[in-house]
Amino acid sequence: MSQFVRRPIAMLFASALAAQSAPAWSDLTGLGPIAGANVQNLGKLAVYQDQGILHTWSAFTRTWTAIAVSANATLRLTNDCLLIRDGTQWTAFSSYSGRFAPLSVSPGAQLVNPSGQDNDSVLLVSDQGSLHAFSGFVGSWVSRAISGQAMVAVQRHVALLADGPTLGGFAAHDGQWHDTVTVTTPLAVTCDGYAGAVESATEVNCFSGIHGTWVRAQKPPGSVRVRNDDWIVWHDGVQATAFSGLRGTVAAGVFGAFALANSEDLFGVFATPAGFVAWSAVTGQFTPVLAAPGATVSTSVGVALFVEPQQVIGFSPTRGTTAGLAITAQVTGVAGVVGYALPSLNGTPLLFSSLTGSWHTPPGDALGGAPLLSTTSALLPTTGGARAFSSRSGAFVPLNAPGLSLDAQASSAPAAAWNTTLLASFDCRTERWITLPRTGTGSPTVQIWRTEMFVVDGNAVHGFGTQVGNWYSTPLPEPWIGGRASSESATVVTNQHVLAFAAVPQTAAMAQFPEFRRASPVGAPLRLQLRLPQGDAAFLAGSVLAPAPMMLPGLGTLLLDPTVMNATFALPDPGQDRSTWALPVPAQPALRGSEWFFQSLVLPTNGAPYLTDAAAVLLL
């Protein structure tokens, strides 16, 4: 595991020539007319099947790779994994390794992953006494023997095994099994997100996929289980035992009558006789009463609003705190980590950020009415253009341009604006509007999903990823006939081309929150991967965000604060075209809520050095 070493900035960024990073847009061409129905993309992956050849592309590697398949082959595509089932040869593909990993199986082999679980980063295969697990983050198969009585389950970033007294938890982040033993008889297994559990009649053995650890607790007799991605609660209607997959800990509470009211990835809201309480996977604790029993509750991934007759209460599950707003709200809304309240239908909206734990009042140029929410920001029209509300600080960042059209979705992070002369997207990480000139006339075609947006504008297509923070453009070789924005990539199809867009930086973090789901808690390793072909070298640097971006001629834009920057020299991992890190993060409460940026200076064997886009990690 690499450690950061303090190095002078001049040493890191010397010998600058013209930057030559791998392009964000990759063109698959030379195959003749494209059958659009054969193009699929999901998460970081895109595939195109053509005359016995499967072309596979990764947003992390930014490379198309081909493999021969039979006419009977079936595909299973998830955000970070591809599984090709072709007779007794099953082959997995990892979005991070960019390589195919074959697995020989018997005719009776079974994929444990249920159909419809498109977000799984783990593939689990059961085959005649063997259990094979594949991590899309690591890119290799791990096999072990199991009995005919074993219970198995898999979802998101965790797989579980209960085989007699042996319990196994497979963690996607390190691609390994972590075992423990139990003295009670397992009756059920459950897993999702980072949280898994094996239940017996009297106890639960809980597994954290991000820590790779187990913890045991008693469960209330006759209890029922409720859960979401990163937490599980067992309750009997009076008392509860709760597990946080982010913290790897268990807590208990007694509440009287107790029932789930709202369920989100990071927390659950429960109704009790005294009012609403919450269990937060981030804090690993139950809250005191948040609001009166009659309050109206609205929730999203990392925020809740409780509307009472005389006030609106914002709850932050990331901080475990509340903030009251003394108004009678006519309209409220939530998305991601943001909420708003309107004192009247045409009044000025008040914005709540779960990250700051506070309500924020916009400047006087904001027009009335409901804002457009994204998962991390809000767009408000103004007398001179628009303002973007940042959940990071509560700032309202202006875009001074006339005649703007605004676009944002509550399920996704991009927040965009355009007029006749410019396209703009708000980078919430750096609290800047990133703009580029229009390349067409009339209204552009915009697709947004999760962390990615692409815009077809005239004879060009522009892509923006909120984990990247930059626009990247490419000419359209011919009119586009289809396309799809996915969570961290996009495909744009023409008659002779498949254009794939990478919405993740080449220095990539496993954590995505608050733009998307995966969070990085203190006390767990902070995991990074850098696309780094064999023969190349790099410096990976980490720091807090610089007060202002620094343009480095010939290299790119440095977002790190050079006065406190630490760096380490990097080479590709053996046999890989990437370098990986698991940086230890102390379990210090003072680190919660801090955000860290990482960029790499890549030194190619052939070509000039270049600076990658930055990855941001918000510690919880």
Image (spheres, grey):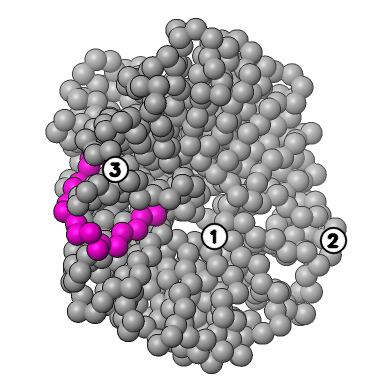
Dot 1 amino acid type: Val
Residue at 42% from the left image edge and 68% from the top image edge: 231
Dot 3 amino acid type: Gly
**Residue 134 belongs to the span the image colors magenta:** no
Which structural element holds mark 2? loop
Real-space Cα separation, disc 2 to disc 3, in angstroms? 61 Å
Q: Quadrant of residue 95?
A: top left
- Mark 3 highlights which residue? 108
| Residue 471 spot, x, y in % from top left | 53, 29
- Mark 2 highlights which residue? 345
Real-space Cα separation, disc 1 to disc 2, in angstroms? 26 Å
Mark before the other along the chain sequence, 2 or 3: 3
Mark before the other along the chain sequence, 1 or 2: 1
Res 328 label: none
Q: Quadrant of residue 362?
A: bottom right
- Mark 1 highlights which residue? 301
Disc 3 packing (10 Å; few <14; some 14–19; many ≥20)? few
Mark before the other along the chain sequence, 1 or 3: 3
Q: Is residue 317 something that shows in the picture?
A: no
Which structural element holds mark 1? loop
Relative to 500, 478 lies left or right: right
Magenta-colored span: 139-156
Q: Is residue 576 above or below residue 277?
A: above
Given residues 453 and 230, the one toward you in this image is 230
Q: Is residue 4 above or below residue 606?
A: below
Residue at 53% from the left image edge and 14% from the top image edge: 34
| Residue 364 spot, x, y in % from top left | 76, 55
Disc 2 packing (10 Å; few <14; some 14–19; many ≥20)? some
Residue at 24% from the left image edge and 63% from the top image edge: 149
| Residue 120 spot, x, y in % from top left | 40, 48
